[in-house]
Amino acid sequence: MTGGVFAVIGAGAWGTALAHLAAGIGHRVRLWCYEPDVAVAIASDHRNHRYLPGISLSSSVSPTTDLAEAVTGVDVVILVVPSHAFRAVLTRLAAHLPVGVPLVSATKGIEVETLALMTDILRDLLPAEGRHALAVRSGPSFAAEVARGAPAAVALACRDPRVGRRLQDALTTDAFKLFTTPDVIGVQVGGALKNVIALAAGGSDGLGFGANARAALITRGLAEIARLGVAMGGQPWTFSGLSGLGDLVLTCTDTQSRNRTVGYRIGRGESLARIMADASFVAEGVQTVRAAYALSRKYRVLMPIVEQVYAVLYEGKDPRKAVTDLMEPSVGDELARPAERPGEGRGHDPTGAG
């Protein structure tokens, strides 16, 4: 599909980058902006100074603050709003959506109050005839690099292979590659929980623990993500792919990562309240850790890194003590199946990483 009309709902850094990408392919794009001043700036000088500075946007990107206008007559809708606002925005949007138009969630998070994935919310609010056309895009992709045309590869999850191929064809460029998968659950779990592990990796870096500790957190964090993802219905192999290992490595190791940055500042001694008060961005992991902590108990999955991040952010635990507590348990066979919570049996580690 070329020359289509796309709606991108959300004009943060990633929404703006996706709108710019789609316009560069030849699609006309309506970009819904929550903030009126962002829409005015894009309309007047084709720049989103607040969220994606330094990028001159295509003239085919048309900003709007009207949700109905954004989606009327479009061929594809891409949802890029923070997870905490996803249900509210979709509730307003649902009545205006054209029936059967593919909806792609590019939001990485879990609804804290209900523990719902974004596709669960979509299914709650959409009519049955539109549910086959739901997809999820996730993977290692910083917005600024995609907007500049730097090479990137991501996963596109869709249970309907025809819809998946259509979206793949519509959004793939020489530099931006989409690889399809039917594992909608696994892709979302990987995309959401990597932000929690990035908080831990950033905290470790802020404490000065170095590359060895960071590598251990990434590896053991991947095992935690995979254990929970499989318990929720995801496929084990998904977590060794772009939306698992790929996104995790990116988010835990680069200074562009918002979640790693928050963790780093906490490791350096700043309070979460101060960081969030002066942050001009959304770090999804700060909320996602609450959902991950609850899901680990719901599915009885052992997730010690998640538990320690939760304790630091919401129980006032000292970050240095959290890291030392992670190192305290007795060591054993790395490939052995890890015991779950006391009295709750044994879990399966699909990564073989413990």
Image (cartoon, rainbow, N blue to C red):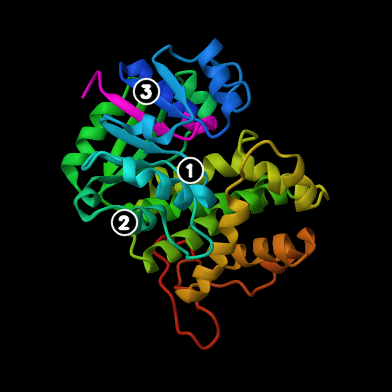
Disc number at residue 123? 2
Circle 2 packing at 10 Å, graded few (<14), some (14-19), many (20+), is some
Q: Which of 273 and 151 is in front in this view?
A: 273
Q: How far apart are marks 1 and 2 (CA)?
A: 26 Å
Residue pictured at 58% horizontal, 31% vertical: 35
Q: Residue 34, can we see it?
A: yes
Q: In terms of secondary structure, where does tag 3 sit?
A: strand
Q: In terms of secondary structure, where does tag 1 sit?
A: helix
- In the rendered image of this protein, does residue 312 appear above or below residue 34? below
Q: State which quarter of the image contains the N terminus.
A: top left
In this figure, which residue is indicated by the disc labeled 1?
247
- The mark nearer the N terminus, 3 or 1, is 3
- The mark nearer the N terminus, 2 or 3, is 3
- In the rendered image of this protein, does residue 236 appear above or below residue 240? below
Residue pictured at 32% horizontal, 40% vertical: 96
Q: In terms of secondary structure, where does tag 2 sit?
A: helix
Q: What amino acid is at disc 1?
A: Asp
Provide the residue span drawn in magenta: 1-15
Front of the two marks 1 and 2: 2
Circle 3 packing at 10 Å, graded few (<14), some (14-19), many (20+), is many
Is residue 201 part of the magenta span, yes or no? no
Q: Are marks 2 and 3 in contact (CB under 8 Å)?
A: no
Is residue 5 part of the magenta span, yes or no? yes
Q: Distance between the residues labelled 2 and 3?
A: 25 Å
Q: What amino acid is at disc 2?
A: Arg
Q: What amino acid is at disc 3?
A: Val
In this figure, which residue is indicated by the disc labeled 3?
29
Q: Nearer the viewer, residue 279 or 347?
A: 279
- In the rendered image of this protein, does residue 121 appear above or below residue 72? below
Q: Do the residues labelled 1 and 2 touch (CB within 8 Å)?
A: no
* Residue 142 image offset from top left, x and y in percent: 52, 32
